[in-house]
Image (cartoon, rainbow, N blue to C red):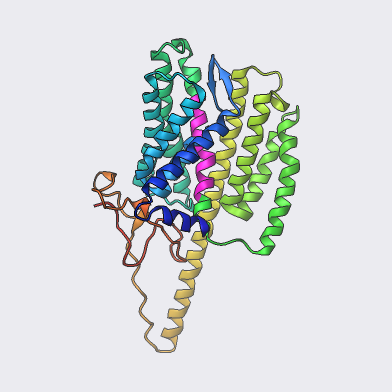
């Protein structure tokens, strides 16, 4: 709830500058964290996980497209922290790093994406549109500029391109769901769930380091933990477990420890990204399937209860009470609007309004009440 209050405060008049500065600070901090663990592939420095891409997509989904200057400024500050003599290609890097998450947000909007990730289609949209698809832009622009400016030989284009693309995509797959879940959290779990969560944390604390740092191939031991977390704690547990595992695997890979000992840099990158990718996809899609099945079961149970009430009234010779008509779709369920882009100045972007979750419609994209907006005009 505190996160929602903070976001609503940034949306107040005069809060635009604060919103942009907050995105800039988060993007820059995430970039510095990502650069702490990097690998050299074909003479270029790449990061196995690039958290700023995930931060940027989450910020655009939560705060709206208007915060894109914060992404551009954050990318500029990251570049300035790496090199003291930036060249003209800096503008290209900034444009690519900004355009990719903006395209991801627009594509997710067109796919009627729900920020609570409670449907399988939301997970698939985030994977294929937000991560694998939109991040092609920043990767192609960045590596292309390195080749055009002579900072990288042309024959190294594809190895570096692949490593760059996977790093950006992993940032979206691991960081964006975690931030969206923090934003949509409404209440703390009961005490009994905290006990099970503590047991899961203890098990993860023992199994994950063993699986990552063992010289044997024991990475498969992580998947039972992810399944346990997905079944009992849905997306929050599975993505948190995947994020912790991915961070430890990245540390081990950059240090050449455990299962990554004795491998070349390209072999390390390939093994690490294959492990992180399959683990993130398993956690995200498995949790989405479980949540969707539980929502379907609740809907069926509710329909059966209503049917029983109607039959009771008919048996007693009474007229069944009228049922309220279903609410029309709004928010994320509404159409993308003309062209799928924001309206003129003053027209709220669909992501700019809070979306309280209701019992009958679990998606956060649904709005109700007189202030609900059907989309851009």
Query: Considering only vertical position in the picture, is 244 above or below 8?
Result: above
Q: Which residue appears at 75% of the width and 28% of the height?
A: 216
Q: Nearer the viewer, residue 58 or 335?
A: 58
Q: Which residue appears at 72% of the width and 29% of the height?
A: 217
Q: Which residue appears at 59% of the width and 34% of the height?
A: 276
Q: Is residue 233 left or right of residue 334?
A: right
Residue projecting furthest to the bottom: 317
Q: Is residue 259 visible?
A: yes
Rendered location of residue 159, percent (x, y): 50, 18
Q: Which residue appears at 53% of the width and 41% of the height?
A: 175
Is residue 277 inside the magenta stretch? no
Q: Nearer the viewer, residue 82 or 107?
A: 82
Q: Is residue 184 left or right of residue 344?
A: right
Rendered location of residue 114, percent (x, y): 43, 52
Instruction: Say which quarter of the image contains residue 325.
Output: bottom left
Q: Is residue 38 left or right of residue 310?
A: right
Q: How many marks?
A: 0
Rendered location of residue 310, percent (x, y): 43, 79
Q: Is residue 111 visible?
A: no
Query: Considering only vertical position in the picture, is 331 above or below 49?
Result: below
Rendered location of residue 42, percent (x, y): 54, 14
Q: Which residues are drawn in magenta?
A: 163-180
Q: Main secondary structure of the magenta part?
A: helix
Is residue 165 inside the magenta stretch? yes
Q: Is residue 248 left or right of residue 357?
A: right
Query: Considering only vertical position in the picture, is 167 above or below 12?
Result: above
């Amino acid at each position: 709830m505190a996160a929602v209050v903070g976001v609503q405060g940034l949306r107040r008049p005069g809060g635009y500058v604060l919103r942009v500065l907050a995105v800039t600070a988060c993007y820059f901090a995430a970039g510095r964290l990502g650069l702490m663990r990097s690998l050299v592939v074909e003479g270029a420095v790449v990061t196995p996980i690039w958290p700023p891409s995930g931060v940027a997509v989450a910020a655009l989904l939560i705060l709206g497209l208007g915060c894109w200057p914060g992404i551009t400024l954050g990318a500029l500050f990251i570049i300035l922290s790496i090199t003291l003599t930036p060249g003209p290609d800096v503008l290209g890097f900034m444009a690519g790093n900004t355009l990719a998450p903006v395209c991801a947000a627009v594509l997710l909007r067109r796919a009627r994406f729900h920020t609570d990730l409670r449907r399988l289609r939301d997970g698939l949209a985030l994977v294929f549109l937000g991560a694998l698809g939109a991040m092609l832009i920043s990767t192609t622009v960045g590596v292309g500029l390195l080749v055009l400016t002579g900072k990288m030989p042309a024959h190294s284009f594809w190895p570096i391109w692949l490593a760059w693309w996977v790093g950006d995509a992993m940032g979206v797959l691991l960081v964006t769901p975690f931030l969206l879940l923090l934003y949509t959290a409404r209440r703390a779990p009961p005490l009994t769930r905290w006990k099970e969560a503590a047991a899961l944390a203890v098990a993860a604390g023992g199994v994950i380091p063993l699986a990552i740092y063992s010289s044997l191939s024991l990475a498969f031991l992580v998947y039972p933990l992810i399944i346990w977390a997905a079944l009992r704690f849905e997306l929050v547990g599975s993505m948190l477990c995947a994020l912790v595992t991915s961070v430890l695997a990245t540390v081990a890979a950059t240090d050449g420890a455990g299962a990554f000992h004795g491998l070349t840099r390209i072999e390390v990158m390939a093994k690490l990204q294959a492990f992180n990718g399959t683990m993130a996809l398993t956690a995200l899609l498995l949790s989405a399937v479980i949540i969707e099945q539980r929502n379907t079961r609740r809907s069926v149970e509710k329909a059966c209860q209503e049917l029983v009430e109607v039959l009771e009234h008919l048996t007693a010779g009474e007229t069944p009470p009228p049922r309220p008509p279903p609410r029309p779709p709004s928010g994320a369920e509404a159409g993308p609007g003309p062209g799928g882009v924001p309206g003129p100045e003053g027209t709220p972007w669909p992501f700019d309004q809070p979306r309280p979750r209701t019992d009958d419609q679990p998606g956060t994209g649904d709005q109700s009440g007189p202030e609900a907006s059907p989309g851009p005009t």
